[in-house]
Image (cartoon, coloured by chain):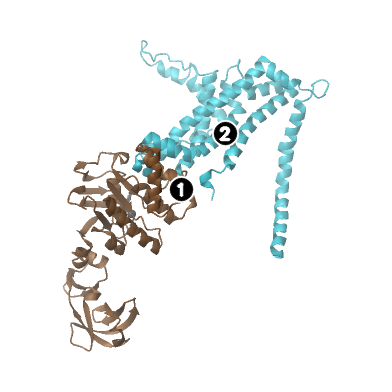
Chain colours: A brown, B cyan
């Protein structure tokens, strides 16, 4: 990753006929950076990706790559490549031919094409599937082929729309690591769409949190986790307890910022409702006068507490938001 | 295990029982007359003995042999015209979202609902050299190129082809539209994404994904035109006849053996396209196998 800006989305608005869409999106992506668009279903992630890929026209604003506007270019002329949410392999072509199609269009010689195809399949762990047709593969396998198909074209900007959604947990984890490795090795600029905050945290140089057609917050995973700017971001990223504070305000506190002790005298009193083992730490839920509160405790502390115990809480760090 | 085989046996019997009436009817109404015709086509009209003469006559007599080739020619031309126009129309209907495209999409089948006899007569009124088009052209200035325009489409090949397009385009378009509807937008988009332009998308994506249905539409159009009667009878030339018209003529003259041989030839021409149909339908493309 370096400091030059590869892609800029400038005050971009795209509204569909029914008024849905995205509004006033501003986004800079640096060369070699992996930026994640994160948000709940329907918030406009695919819409942004499709405007960059050229599949839908903007209502307003501009998109530039290396400083040059690309919005008048048709998709086939844009230096982007997209892995679609529905993977979109060509059903009448073998895996090999699916991968070769774009390379042929770029007039790459046969020998190099074959090398790239083999390399692409190796990267997504699909070597040996050359002769299969898309209809003969599982969704996850097709998804990986679609990723390989885009990767080997070495686009200026790679657009990935929930590329791992059809994969099982183990392969998804492997693919995330593989993608991150390829992406840094080849210094590719990537926009990655997901609604999985954990995936976004793991992968991203920067996360763009979206809600209802606009950007709520941009920043590194750390910045967003440590300083969520709104009630929405606070609730969407990581675990957070929200406690009513009167005047339409809410106090927000992360479970790991709560200290629990037996007895009374803290900021808030409560009783233990459940204790749940989550590996090397435990999650405890407490009934308080401000509602249910979730806290984490270490396994050492675990035998101090049991269901029904009266406890009191102290907060290391809190946030305050307007109630939504 | 025994239970199921017993049920299967019963089911089979039931299916045979249920199908028997239909089989008998089709035997009586289709197969029997067909065999009858075939036998008749090999009979000498006077002696009643076996002979190839009827066929020899059909292929050597000037009028009848011309009718055979003319029929094939018209059918092939109709297929080519219909399919190319229908394909373009279907592509437009599938890939354009305009209002015009939508309203054409709602209307293109309407010609199918007009009885063929009515349609042919109505079209005659419009395209004859003293018909509607001609009368409109008379409204123009006398020196204008459009003045006294004579379409020259009746009683010749052009007229028949024009009418055949009228009848077959809606049907062929319907089949091709259905085929194109099966090609998702996204498949086209991902081809655009890797850099394919319009022509390439057509030849590498859309055509391979739809040619089977196009071929099926073509065989149907071919078949219905080999045996067509109404159109060539009403607007065809009197010198060059199509087989349907020729057949009726022979029948009218009491030449039943020649008529029988003619219908066998029509049948054989139709079976060619039936074979093409069955072949394309049964041949599973590699990518459809699982
Ligand atoms: N072609 C369209 N016509 C009209 N509205 C659309 C169209 N495509 C998307 N929308 C609307 O725009 C909004 C954003 O959709 P978009 O597909 O970008 O969401 P998303 O964030 O990708 O969601 P998901 O996570 O479910 O894929 C939604 O409200 C959706 O209903
Ligand atoms: Mg989406």
Sort mark 1 into few (<14), some (14-19) or many (20+) by Cα contacts within 10 Å. Answer: some
Q: How far apart are marks 1 and 2 (CA)?
A: 35 Å
Residue named by callout 1: A130
Q: Quadrant of residue B140 in the image?
A: top left
Taking the spot 71% from the left edge, 61% from the top edge, the residue there is B5
Q: Where is residue A144 in the image (x, y as percent from the top left)?
A: 39, 53
Q: Mark 1 or mark 2: which is in front?
A: 1
Taking the spot 35% from the left edge, 47% from the top edge, the residue there is A150
Q: Quadrant of residue B255 in the image?
A: top right
Task: Determine which of the numbered discs, if any, sits on residue B167 in the image.
Answer: none
Which chain's residue wears label 2? B
Residue at far top of view: B143
| Quadrant into which the N terminus of chain B falls | bottom right
Q: Can residue B39 be seen in this view?
A: yes
Task: Determine which of the numbered discs, if any, sits on residue B219 in the image.
Answer: 2
- Lateral position of residue A69 relative to residue B42, left or right: left
- Lateral position of residue A225 relative to residue A172, left or right: left
Q: Is mark 1 on a helix, strand or loop?
A: loop
Q: Is residue A86 visible?
A: no
Q: Where is residue A24 in the image (x, y as percent from the top left)?
A: 20, 51
Q: What element carries label 2?
A: helix
Q: Is residue B244 above or below residue A135?
A: above
Residue at far bottom of view: A263
Q: Nearer the viewer, residue B108 or B203?
A: B203
Mark 1 vs ligand 2: CB below 8 Å:
no
The reply to whether discs 1 and 2 touch (Cβ–Cβ < 8 Å) is no
Marks 1 and 2 on same chain:
no
Taking the spot 39% from the left edge, 14% from the top edge, the residue there is B147
Sort mark 2 into few (<14), some (14-19) or many (20+) by Cα contacts within 10 Å. Answer: many
Q: Quadrant of residue A173 in the image?
A: bottom left
Q: Nearer the viewer, residue B157 or A302?
A: A302
Taking the spot 18% from the left edge, 69% from the top edge, the residue there is A321
């Amino acid at each position: 990753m370096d400091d030059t800006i590869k892609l800029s989305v400038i005050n971009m608005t795209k509204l569909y006929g029914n008024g849905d869409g995205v509004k006033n999106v501003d986004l800079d992506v640096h060369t070699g950076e992996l930026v994640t668009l994160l948000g709940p279903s329907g918030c406009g992630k695919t819409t942004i990706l499709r405007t960059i890929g050229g599949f839908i026209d903007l209502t307003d604003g501009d998109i530039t790559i290396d400083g040059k506007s690309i919005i008048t270019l048709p998709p086939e002329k844009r230096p982007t490549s997209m892995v679609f949410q529905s993977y979109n392999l060509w059903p009448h072509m073998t895996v090999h031919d699916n991968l070769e199609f774009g390379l042929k269009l770029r007039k790459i010689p046969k020998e190099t094409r074959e090398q790239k195809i083999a390399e692409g399949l190796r990267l997504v762990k699909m070597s040996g599937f050359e002769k299969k047709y898309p209809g003969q593969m599982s969704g996850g396998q097709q998804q990986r082929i679609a990723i390989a198909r885009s990767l080997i074209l070495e686009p200026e900007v790679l657009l990935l729309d929930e590329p791992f959604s059809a994969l099982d947990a183990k392969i998804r984890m492997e693919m995330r690591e593989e993608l991150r490795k390829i992406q840094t090795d080849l210094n590719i600029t990537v926009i990655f769409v997901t609604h999985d905050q954990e995936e976004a945290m793991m992968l991203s140089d920067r996360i763009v949190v979206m809600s209802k057609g606009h950007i709520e917050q941009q920043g590194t995973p750390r910045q967003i986790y440590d300083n969520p700017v709104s009630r929405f971001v606070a609730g969407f990223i990581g675990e957070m307890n929200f406690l009513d504070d009167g005047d339409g305000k809410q106090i927000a506190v992360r479970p790991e910022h709560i200290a629990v002790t037996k007895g009374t005298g803290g900021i808030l009193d409560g009783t233990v409702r459940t204790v749940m083992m989550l590996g090397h730490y435990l999650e405890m839920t407490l009934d308080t006068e401000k509602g249910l509160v979730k806290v984490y405790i270490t396994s050492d502390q675990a035998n101090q507490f049991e269901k029904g115990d009266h406890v009191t809480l102290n907060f290391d760090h809190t946030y305050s938001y307007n109630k939504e | 295990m025994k239970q199921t085989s017993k049920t299967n046996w019963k089911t089979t019997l039931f299916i045979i029982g249920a199908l028997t009436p239909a089989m008998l009817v089709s035997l009586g109404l289709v197969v029997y007359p067909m065999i009858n015709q075939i036998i008749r086509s090999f009979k000498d009209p006077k002696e009643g003995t076996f002979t190839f003469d009827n066929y020899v006559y059909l292929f050597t007599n000037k009028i009848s042999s011309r009718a055979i080739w003319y029929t094939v020619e018209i059918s092939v031309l109709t297929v080519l015209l219909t399919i190319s126009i229908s394909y373009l129309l279907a592509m437009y209907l599938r890939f354009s979202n305009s209002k015009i495209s939508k309203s054409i999409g709602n209307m293109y089948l309407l010609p199918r609902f007009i009885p063929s006899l009515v349609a042919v007569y109505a079209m005659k009124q419009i395209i004859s050299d003293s018909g509607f088009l001609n009368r409109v052209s008379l409204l123009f200035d006398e020196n204008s190129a459009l003045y006294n325009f004579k379409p020259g489409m009746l009683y010749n090949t052009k007229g028949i082809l024009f009418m055949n397009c009228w009848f077959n385009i809606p049907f062929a378009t319907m089949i091709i539209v259905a085929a194109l509807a099966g090609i998702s937008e996204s498949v086209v988009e991902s081809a655009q994404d890797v850099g394919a332009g319009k022509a390439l998308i057509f030849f590498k994506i859309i055509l391979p994904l739809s040619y089977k249905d196009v071929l099926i539409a073509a065989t149907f159009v071919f078949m219905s035109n080999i045996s067509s009667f109404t159109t060539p009878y009403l607007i065809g030339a009197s010198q060059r006849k199509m087989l349907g018209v020729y057949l009726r003529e022979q029948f009218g003259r009491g030449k039943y053996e020649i008529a029988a041989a003619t219908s066998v030839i029509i049948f054989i021409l139709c079976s060619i396209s039936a074979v093409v149909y069955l072949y394309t339908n049964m041949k599973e493309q590699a990518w459809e196998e699982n």
